[in-house]
Amino acid sequence: MELKESVLELIRRAATDLPPDVEQVLRKAYDNEDENTPAKNVLSTILENVKMARKQSTPMCQDTGSLVFYIDYPERGLEKDFRQAIEWAAVEATNRQYLRPNAVDPVTGKNSGNNLGINAPYIHFHQWDKEETRIRLLLKGGGSENVGAQYKLPYPPLNAGRDLKGVRKVIIDAVKNAQGLGCAPGTIGVGIGGGRDTSYALSKEQFFRKMGQRSGNKELAELEAELLNDLNKLEIGPMGFGGKTTVLDVFIASQARHPATFYVSVSYNCWAFRRKTMIIKNGEVHYDD
Amino acid sequence: MTIKLKTPISEEEIRKLRIGDTVLLSGVIVTARDQAHKLMIEERPDFIREYLKESVIYHCGPVVRKDENGNWQFVSAGPTTSAREEPYQSDVIREYKVRGVIGKGGMGAKTAQGLKEYGAVYFHAVGGAGTLIANTVKRVIDVFKLEEFGTPEAFWVIEVEDFPLVVTMDSHGGSIHKEILEKSSKIAEELMK
């Protein structure tokens, strides 16, 4: 299969096939909610929808998001080749209704109709020492993107200082402010440190971790576990109708900061978690979630 | 208990609904998003009037396709965030005698007042359940402003059957969104102590 066709298949899988680890966490959440509550009904509808989308090969959510690619490629790879393959695949995926046209020019207000535009699809390129190529794709919905937030510590309104206690406070605040608007139950990605741009970028890249995969940093891993528990006490619940499941998981990462700055970026991913990975090794393509 | 409703819906029927009610909606409804709402307020077009009277507006930008016979089909059609229509919604409800609005995330005080005054409710659909909801769309009856607005923003007149919804704002001033926000804000404050 040509590169462009395997990227098209990557997009199809991302839009129509919820990763099994996410589905399993949603199923657990369903079991955990009380009978005859809006929370349980919502989760039941979500799980039914996931099954139907996979079977029909149609987008689980009509907002098929913005396409964000992360490519790790070997020494001999050419960025231009990847870009061409991705652009072809995005147009074709739109023709086949795996994607809704979601690239709008902010100056003219015009939707390009094929998901192409300036920086769309967005591609993060990274050259690595391995012989294989890894292409990761996130389809990031607009509703959940809108509830993301960036804080600058110290943050006086919450009395949040420049330490992990302060970080914890602003994460709780962000999820409280999001309510059901990001299509709860969501997954929370957090980037601590860096500049304004790299802080958000780090928070979003956390969405490639599998459900339950704790940070390698002991303190951050503990904070993740604590927040997962605390955020589910907020009783915002699925779609914000109340209930025990407000978030599915919390992923936190840190990077160096300038002595004068301390950013905490919180990205929200809706329950319709659209991520897929493909590895190309010795000419063979292998897909993963 | 689940309540079955079919458009056109009378004011009496809509006033019976309370927040937390689960509803299966059938009949003809119309999708409308930002550009459609702006148009309805700025130009008050008549082409959509007959479809909206005692019917329901759906905040949705669908994925659609044409079948072999050239008929439109809904492929994926979950709700979009309703808050963007807050400046227009109440006036649209009054102008077009709409009985309900479907979306996600709830709406603000102006819409809440409109629901009370003109007899309408806010239905919440399950965000992200695009395929499931598209399967409840039996037929596309007509589409307006497709060329001008593009697929997501056009007025799609559709017939639905058993579209699953929850009433989250009723015609008596009740709002699940307001209740949950107040409750979760208190809990958040406790958690931060």
Image (cartoon, rainbow, N blue to C red):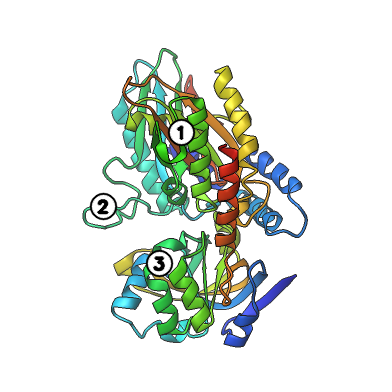
The kind of residue on which mark 2 rests is: Pro
Chain of the residue under the numbered disc 3 shown in the image = B
**Residue ID for mark 2:** A106
Using residue A141 as the reference point, say whether residue B28 is left or right of it.
right
Separation (CA) of disc 1 from disc 3: 34 Å
Q: Are marks 1 and 2 in contact (CB under 8 Å)?
A: no
Quadrant of the snapshot with the N terminus of chain B: bottom right
* Front: mark 1 or 2: 1
**Residue ID for mark 1:** A160
**Residue at disc 2, secondary structure:** loop
| Residue B85, disc | 3
Residue drawn at x 33%, y 71% as measured from the top left: B38
Separation (CA) of disc 1 from disc 2: 35 Å
Give whichever of A180, A153 is nearer the camera.
A153
* Front: mark 3 or 2: 3
Using residue A272 as the reference point, say whether residue A267 is left or right of it.
left
Residue drawn at x 54%, y 42% as measured from the top left: A273
Q: How many neighbours does mark 2 have within 10 angstroms: few (below 14), some (14-19), or many (20 or more)?
A: few
Residue A1 visible in the current orientation: no
Where is residue B62? Give x, y as percent.
46, 62
| Relative to B55, residue A5 above or below | above
